[in-house]
Image (cartoon, coloured by chain):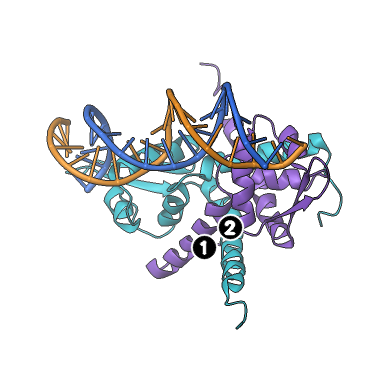
Chain colours: A cyan, B purple, C orange, D blue
Amino acid sequence: MISEKLSAPECTKHLMAVRDALDVINGKWKIQIIIALWEGNTRFKDIERRIPKITARMLSKELKDLECHQLVKRTVYDTLPVSVEYTATPHAQTLYPVIEELKKWGNLHRKKILEKQQVPELA
Amino acid sequence: MISEKLSAPECTKHLMAVRDALDVINGKWKIQIIIALWEGNTRFKDIERRIPKITARMLSKELKDLECHQLVKRTVYDTLPVSVEYTATPHAQTLYPVIEELKKWGNLHRKKILEKQQVPELA
DNA sequence: CCGTATCCCGGGGGATACTG
DNA sequence: CAGTATCCCCCGGGATACGG
């Protein structure tokens, strides 16, 4: 699978793409927000309520970032008072496999760490 | 694929695993180091040379983290002066699919961003 | 060679108060 | 409701110097 070694240029290209990806989804909130958008009601206050501990400041900032990266679409409705909906773009859907792999590995890793935490044996 | 909505508890579980994974591989250097370990010579100085801009301080710190997470094994050889080798553990190999997905998405995303950067049309 | 200790800066991000 | 503005703290991480 990774039996052969990578050449330096190969490795660098490999790495750049990975970094590009991490630059977008890294950080404390981005993924949580994207997952939250797959959950239903997506008005600002709804999202805020759904993500534990996030502040309006951070949510606002992160949503803007995601919009820049074309992962989120912002729609303003002319109600009174105004309501705003954030939706995941089709491009955001392409993140699904990434998030799935992260989830799978997160679970695997948790098991791994816990198994080693076992009491080694009685003395 | 993601047609059905997630229930709140489902979503939370989903999220915890993803966060677990990101906690481990997040940060500026972790992935670069893991990839570097798949490249061959893995003495401290070798790794340092292979990762542009990393400092000894950071490399040292990050290697310790990775060791805690059981992704890296540290071996000291009793030479003079001492030499130390770092190797990726089998558990680190399980990260391969994650990194692959990140790489794929990084490339996809780059294309997406560039295409939208095109001149929209002549006025 | 293989690191660690110290110093220091910038920015990520919380708390709170406020506006349209 | 949907955010912004301000203040402020903490720590990630660079530079440098040094010890085994």
Residue A110 picture location, percent across and down: 56, 66
Classify mark 2: helix, strand or loop. Answer: helix
Residue B69 picture location, percent across and down: 61, 58
Q: Residues within 10 Å of mark 1 (few under 14, many from 20)?
A: many
Chain letter of the residue carrying label 1: B
Is residue B107 among what the camera can see? no
Residue A44 picture location, percent across and down: 30, 48
Disc 2 target residue: A102
Point 43% across, 64% down: residue: B11
Point 76% across, 51% down: residue: B76
Is residue B79 positioned above or below A41 on the image?
A: above
Q: Quadrant of residue A58?
A: top left
Which is nearer the eye, B53 or B11? B53
Is residue B62 among what the camera can see? yes
Instruction: In the rendered structure, find residue B17 and report the number of the disc placed on it.
Output: 1
Is residue B42 positioned above or below B118 on the image?
A: below
Chain letter of the residue carrying label 2: A
Residue B86 picture location, percent across and down: 74, 49
A35 sits left or right of A112 in the view: left
Which residue type does callout 2 highlight? Answer: Leu
Quarter the N terminus of chain B occupies: bottom right
Which is nearer the eye, B82 or B122? B82
Are the residues at dot 2 and dot 1 in contact (C-beta closer than 8 Å)?
A: yes
Q: Alpha carbon of mark 2 to alpha carbon of mark 1: how far? A: 7 Å
Point 47% across, 44% down: residue: A27
Which is nearer the eye, A2 or A118? A118
